[in-house]
Amino acid sequence: MKNLFLVLLFAVLQTPLFGQFGINASYCFNDAPDWQGRDLEIVSQDAQVLADGFAFGIDYWFRLKNQRIEFLPELNFARFAIDETVDFTVTNYSLFFNTNIYFLDFQGDCDCPTWSKEGPTLEKGLYFQLSPGITYIQQEIETIISTLDDSELAFSLGAGLGFDIGISDLITITPNAGVRYFFPTNWEDLEILNLESSDSSPPSTESTNLQFHAGIRLGFRFDQ
């Protein structure tokens, strides 16, 4: 799956420069409540083993002809790491099918995001996003004596808001924020490591992840 991600990224970069491409960066706050282990410094406290961290993506833009529904399929990379006595690292390779709905300008004839036509900026720029996705997750636990590697495939569904700020016919800046729900995913090596919670119950190897994110996208329009 990692190799497939690299092949898809290369294919995107080799596509003829028409339409709009974008690059983005965001910070992600993860909440996987069932992936927990005894805190490595405070023995009496349980702690999640999925850290927060940065994500980066590249996308390609196209849209419907008569309605302002725009599609931005995206390749995304993220890495979340906790470096303690035991190190926990999660690396995500994702494909998101972002769909932006400009609900204030749904029937508009704007040739956005080139901003060549007149009209209220708020109506042109504000959108609601739906984003189903699939993610190849690499999970690693590194101890003093060994390294445990695992991998899983996870499905997710995201939603959010964004606002396009047209700098010119070529460049658009888009601050955005949202939430993504990852359906239950296994991390079997947590059981192998035998991390015990405070009530001595067996550790869970399966958890959902509710991820909040905020970031910015830089869009380029090459056909103007």
Image (cartoon, grey):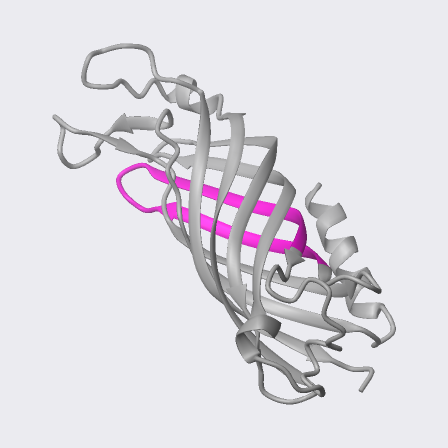
| Residue 185 spot, x, y in % from top left | 53, 26
Q: Which of 216 and 76 is in front in this view?
A: 216
Q: Which residue is drawn at 59% across and 53% down?
A: 129
The magenta stretch spans which residues?
71-99
Does residue 172 appear left or right of residue 78 in this picture? right
Q: Decide: is 94 above or below 46.
A: below
Q: Decide: is 5 above or below 168.
A: above
| Residue farthest along the right direction in this orientation | 16
| Residue 131 spot, x, y in % from top left | 62, 47
Does residue 207 appear left or right of residue 111 in this picture? left
| Residue 140 spot, x, y in % from top left | 47, 36
Q: Quadrant of residue 13?
A: bottom right
| Residue farthest along the top direction in this orientation | 201
Q: Which residue is drawn at 57% across and 80% down?
A: 120
Q: Decide: is 104 above or below 8.
A: below
Q: Quadrant of residue 109?
A: bottom right
Q: Which residue is drawn at 39% across and 43% down?
A: 30
Q: Decide: is 39 above or below 105.
A: above
Residue 92 belongs to the span the image colors magenta: yes
Residue 143 belongs to the span the image colors magenta: no
Q: Nearer the viewer, residue 63 or 91?
A: 63
SS majority, magenta: strand
